[in-house]
Image: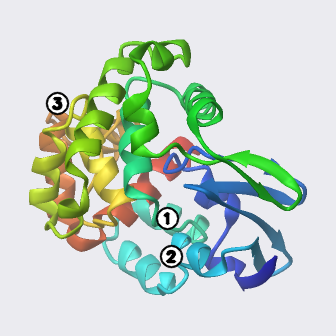
């Protein structure tokens, strides 16, 4: 086990994990246990430092995006002079965008559509326990996120029993598509081309494609729009559009390469009633 730390002002575990971008984490000891793919870490606040403990420190250094200067991102967010955005960037400056495993994000956000976070976490947990390889971290046994091959070979009934509902067929079909084609070509695409490719996968619409692009492929110019962001658009930007695709395009045009970071500040700030 290797331990490293980071300035807690710009890396707060609760803010980072509680903003809807990740589903495989749970309270543990002084902080949280986080699982990604077939790896795990513990992350917690210790005074002015946030501490990460892992057998794979390089993986989680990248996962938590610790090579990026978030003081500049906070400054850029405040420069737009949007009151909610300024308040949120100041209060939640410890929120970081994660660099997550691409395939895991594809399946996770298919499951997330028209769903709530506790239920999403439960479904993913059951799928991992049923199909994922076991691994040991810190003396405890955990289930890795299943490989695409394992997902593709599972009967659609497995996903129904796991609680996927109508999404069971989408998970099964998308896993078979990825097993046959791979996703290596996706990583090399620009943001717009990636979104178009993702829309060809069963069960992926505009919002899911934006979430996968942002959280699974690190396309920071994406701006997913859900109920909370629609509320932000109406109440804080005086918007009149009703189509989420157009609202997303509006925000992405306004915030450009910082869209993903700003989306998280606005989402979290509105949800926390700032």
Relative image position of residue 162 (x, y in whole percent): 55, 19
| Mark 3 lies on residue | 242
The mark nearer the N terminus, 1 or 3, is 1
Q: In this rendering, does residue 84 appear at all?
A: no
The mark nearer the N terminus, 3 or 2, is 2
Side (left or right) of 7 relative to 219: right
Instruction: Say how many tags the image has.
Output: 3
Neighbours of disc 2 within 10 Å: few (<14), some (14-19), many (20+): some
In-front residue for pair 194/149 = 149
Quadrant where the image shows the N terminus: bottom right
Q: What secondary structure is marked by label 1? A: loop
Q: Which mark is residue 65?
A: 2
Using the numbered discs, state the Cα–Cα distance from disc 3 to disc 2 in whole angstroms.
Answer: 34 Å
Q: Which mark is residue 98?
A: 1
Residue, x 14% and y 66% (percent of image)?
A: 189
Q: In this view, does 258 lie above or below 141?
A: below
Residue, x 40% and y 43% (percent of image)?
A: 148
Q: Is residue 9 above or below residue 201?
A: below
Using the numbered discs, state the Cα–Cα distance from disc 1 to disc 3 in whole angstroms.
Answer: 29 Å
Relative image position of residue 135 (x, y in whole percent): 72, 53
Q: What secondary structure is marked by label 3? A: loop
Neighbours of disc 3 within 10 Å: few (<14), some (14-19), many (20+): few
Q: Is residue 182 above or below residue 4?
A: above
Residue, x 65% and y 33% (percent of image)?
A: 129
Relative image position of residue 73 (x, y in whole percent): 42, 79
């Amino acid at each position: 086990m290797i331990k490293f730390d980071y300035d807690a002002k710009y890396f707060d575990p609760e803010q980072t994990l509680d903003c809807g971008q990740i589903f495989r984490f749970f309270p543990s000891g002084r902080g949280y246990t986080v699982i990604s793919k077939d790896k795990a870490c513990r992350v917690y606040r210790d005074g002015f430092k946030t501490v990460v403990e892992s057998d794979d420190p390089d993986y989680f250094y990248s996962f938590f995006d610790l090579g990026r200067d978030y003081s500049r991102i906070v400054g850029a967010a405040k420069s737009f002079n949007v009151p909610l955005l300024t308040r949120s960037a100041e209060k939640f400056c410890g929120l970081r965008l994660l660099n997550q495993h691409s395939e895991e994000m594809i399946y996770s956000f298919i499951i997330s559509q028209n769903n709530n976070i506790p239920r999403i976490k439960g479904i993913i947990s059951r799928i991992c326990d049923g199909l994922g390889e076991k691994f040991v971290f810190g003396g405890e046994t955990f289930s890795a996120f299943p490989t695409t091959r394992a997902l593709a070979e599972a009967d659609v009934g497995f996903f129904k029993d796991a609680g996927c509902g109508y999404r069971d067929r989408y998970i099964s079909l998308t896993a078979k598509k990825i097993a046959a084609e791979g996703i290596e070509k996706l990583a090399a695409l620009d943001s717009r081309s990636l979104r178009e490719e993702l829309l060809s996968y069963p069960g992926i619409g505009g919002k899911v494609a934006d979430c996968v692009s942002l959280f699974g492929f690190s396309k920071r110019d994406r701006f997913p729009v859900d109920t909370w962001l629609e509320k932000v658009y109406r109440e804080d930007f005086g918007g009149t559009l009703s189509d989420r695709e157009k609202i997303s395009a509006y925000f992405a045009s306004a915030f450009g390469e910082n869209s993903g970071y700003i989306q998280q500040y606005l989402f979290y700030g509105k949800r926390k009633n700032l």
